[in-house]
Amino acid sequence: MHHYDAPHSHGAIDSNPSFTPSFNDSNNDNRLPSVADPHSADVYRDHPMLATQPKTSCEPIGYDEREDRIYELIVCQQPLHARMCGFGEKDRRPIDPPPIVQLVVQQGGSRGPVDVQTLQAPFFVLHVTLWSDDRKEERNIISNPPKCTRVLMGSLVSSPSLLKNTEGEQGLYFAFPDLSIRTEGRYTLRFSLMKLVSSDFQTNAKSKIIAQVFSDPFTVYSAKKFPGMTESTELSKTFAKQGLKIPIRNDVRTKRTD
């Protein structure tokens, strides 16, 4: 029987992600200020984009005082379902459709949107982790004696691409085309945005999380119950035409049911 454990409760974890920022929610330095927090920066608390934000542990809109900018994450392509990939290293079953997250940047003090072409895109990093469908518990590590194993497989870190959406509007987008999950169940994905600065490259440095957002809940099925992959979305096709490496499916066959 498999058991879920906290990521730091075991020493031996195989297939570690290539980039592992610190996501300790108990560390106040890494937590986003709440809109309802009287100690938050004035520009963050008073900005019209943030006025109606509820007080939660995961804020899709965050303020970075280093540049006086507000960063918003929007999951513009939600995961629908996936087939579990099991514990083999070669059997990968990508989440369908691949999650895509947009980054929108506003200048502080209600000075309007920031031109995406002026942003230092290579320094933005979006990291994804696996959570329960109620968003209360992490599901990143599973106890599979005699060792612990990652549940969420694939590239867990994405850099932004400057792309035009289906309406021809240009923006910064993060894509996760090769995520797969080892075990069946109901899950959500949590995306955490960081902008790397020179101090983040020092030994034992912790990158500051600017904003976080959850995906909608989705289902991971066993091989027998999986209904099959869907046709690629128009957004995926549009981005693929612009050079984004994302799988495209046009001839989808519906799985037969007896």
Image (tube, helix red, strand yellow):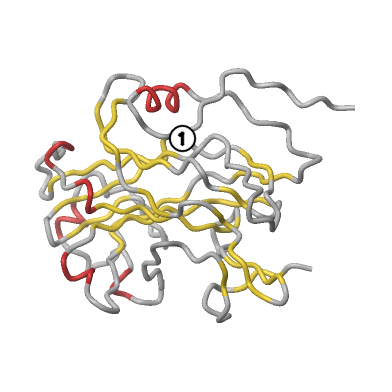
Quadrant in the rendering for residue 64: bottom left
The residue at which mark 1 appears reads as 77
Vertical arrangement, residue 234 with respect to residue 6, above or below? above
The residue lying at 54 percent from left, 34 percent from top is 97
Q: Residue farthest to the front?
A: 90
User: Left or right: where does residue 145 sit relative to residue 121?
Assistant: right
| Nearest the eye: 257 or 56 | 257
Which quarter of the rendering shows the C terminus? top right
| Nearest the eye: 12 or 234 | 12
Vertical arrangement, residue 45 with respect to residue 73, above or below? below
Disc 1 marks which amino acid?
A: Gln
Instruction: Give neighbour class at mark 1: few <14, some 14-19, many 20+ (Cα, 10 Å).
Output: some
| Nearest the eye: 178 or 23 | 178
The residue lying at 25 percent from left, 44 percent from top is 49
Vertical arrangement, residue 35 with respect to residue 249, above or below? below
The residue lying at 62 percent from left, 46 percent from top is 92
* Image position, residue 176 (x, y; %): 45, 44
Which quarter of the rendering shows the N terminus? bottom right
Instruction: Give the secondary structure at mark 1.
Output: strand
The residue lying at 53 percent from left, 47 percent from top is 179
* Image position, residue 233 (x, y; %): 50, 24
Vertical arrangement, residue 181 with respect to residue 77, above or below? below
* Image position, residue 12 (x, y; %): 58, 78
